[in-house]
Amino acid sequence: MTAISTIRFIGPAMETALIDAGIADAETLREFGADAAYFKLLENGQRRHFIEYYVMHMALQGRPWNDCKGAEKDALRMTFDALCAKYVYAARTELETFMNRIGVRK
């Protein structure tokens, strides 16, 4: 098990957030990939932040965060927005399921 912070450009705050979300080491983060890892952060209550998302993408590629530009950054923004929408939908569905279970209806 290698500390997440050994991945260049990922600092202690992100490492703590990832560990809190159940991603304990660098190997697990690499296995998950940036999209799945970021979704786990959202599930754990992390607020949505595009820069954190693309920094993680760049770090897993061994690239500095400011290397993300132009069409690549635009594509990552679209993926980020879709990922956040997926999370919001999943959270809403979970809430609706709970509300139905306790008998709350429209």
Image (cartoon, rainbow, N blue to C red):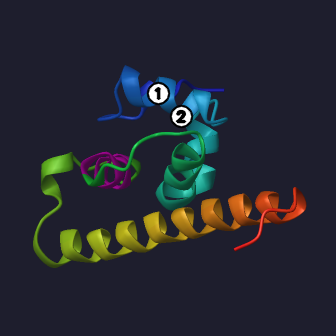
- Distance from Cα at disc 2 to Cα at disc 1: 5 Å
- Main SS category, magenta section: helix
- Left or right: where 42 falls relative to 79: right
Q: Quadrant of residue 82?
A: bottom left
Q: Quadrant of residue 47?
A: top left
Residue position marked by numbered label 1 in the rendering: 15
Where does residue 21 sit, x and y in percent of width and height? 61, 36
Where does residue 76 sit, x and y in percent of width and height? 30, 69
Instruction: Indicate whether residue 75 is drawn in magenta.
Output: no
Q: Is residue 25 above or below residue 59?
A: above
Amino acid marked by disc 1: Glu
Tag 2 and tag 1, C-beta contact below 8 Å: yes
Of residues 32 and 7, the one nearer the viewer is 32
Q: Is residue 78 above or below residue 7?
A: below
Residue 18 is marked as 2
Q: Residue at x 60, y 48 (%)?
A: 43
Q: Which residues are magenta?
A: 51-59
Q: Residue at x 64, y 42 (%)?
A: 28
